[in-house]
Image (cartoon, rainbow, N blue to C red):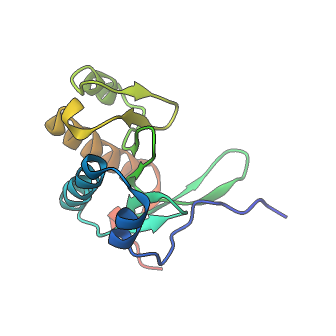
Amino acid sequence: MPAQNKTTETKVDVTDFVNSYVDNAQKKADSFQLIELMTKWSGYEPKMWGPTIIGFGSYHYKYASGHEGDAPIIGFSPRKAAFSLYVFSPTEDNKHLLENLGKFKMAKACIYIKKLSDINISTLELLCKSSIAYINEHHECSCRDIKE
């Protein structure tokens, strides 16, 4: 039996999640600002994915291994240590954008920031829009308005 994906869309209210999960006033304000920005940039309303990820839109992925599932097109999680931003797709343009992003740490699939004031919001917008375009080109996603 294939493994179940932990990160699936849930019915939890995003505002309730932020208000109950985020205990730092600055992180809470930054969370609501990110929700507003990512909603505007993506054209999708925020939804909870798993217990702590706020995602926008969705796409279906399938790896060569046969593992497949659905994931948000872009998103973030207001974790205790730092925000995890799920906005990066591996393109040459995106690598150049990172040079202008500001203060962050990079992991394989996400960018970690302490607070929004540490980064350049216009660069974050370009990263988000570039990722949306990349996913639209390489995956079946809601950004193509595919009807099931």
The residue depicted at 64 percent of the width and 57 percent of the height is: 68
The percent coordinates of residue 145 (x first, y second) are 34, 71
Which quadrant is the N terminus positioned in? bottom right
Left or right: 19 in relation to 106: left
The residue depicted at 40 percent of the width and 34 percent of the height is: 112
The residue depicted at 38 percent of the width and 56 percent of the height is: 22
The percent coordinates of residue 41 (x first, y second) are 20, 55
The percent coordinates of residue 69 (x first, y second) are 60, 60
Res. 142 visible in picture: no
Left or right: 8 in relation to 2: left
Depth check, front residue: 140 or 38: 38
Residue farthest to the left? Answer: 122
Depth check, front residue: 41 or 147: 41
The percent coordinates of residue 104 (x first, y second) are 34, 27
Kindly indicate the quadrant of the structure image that contains residue 56: bottom left
- Count the numbered circles shown: 0
Depth check, front residue: 12 or 26: 26
Res. 19 visible in picture: yes
Depth check, front residue: 39 or 52: 52
Left or right: 143 in relation to 129: right
Residue farthest to the right? Answer: 1
The residue depicted at 68 percent of the width and 44 percent of the height is: 64
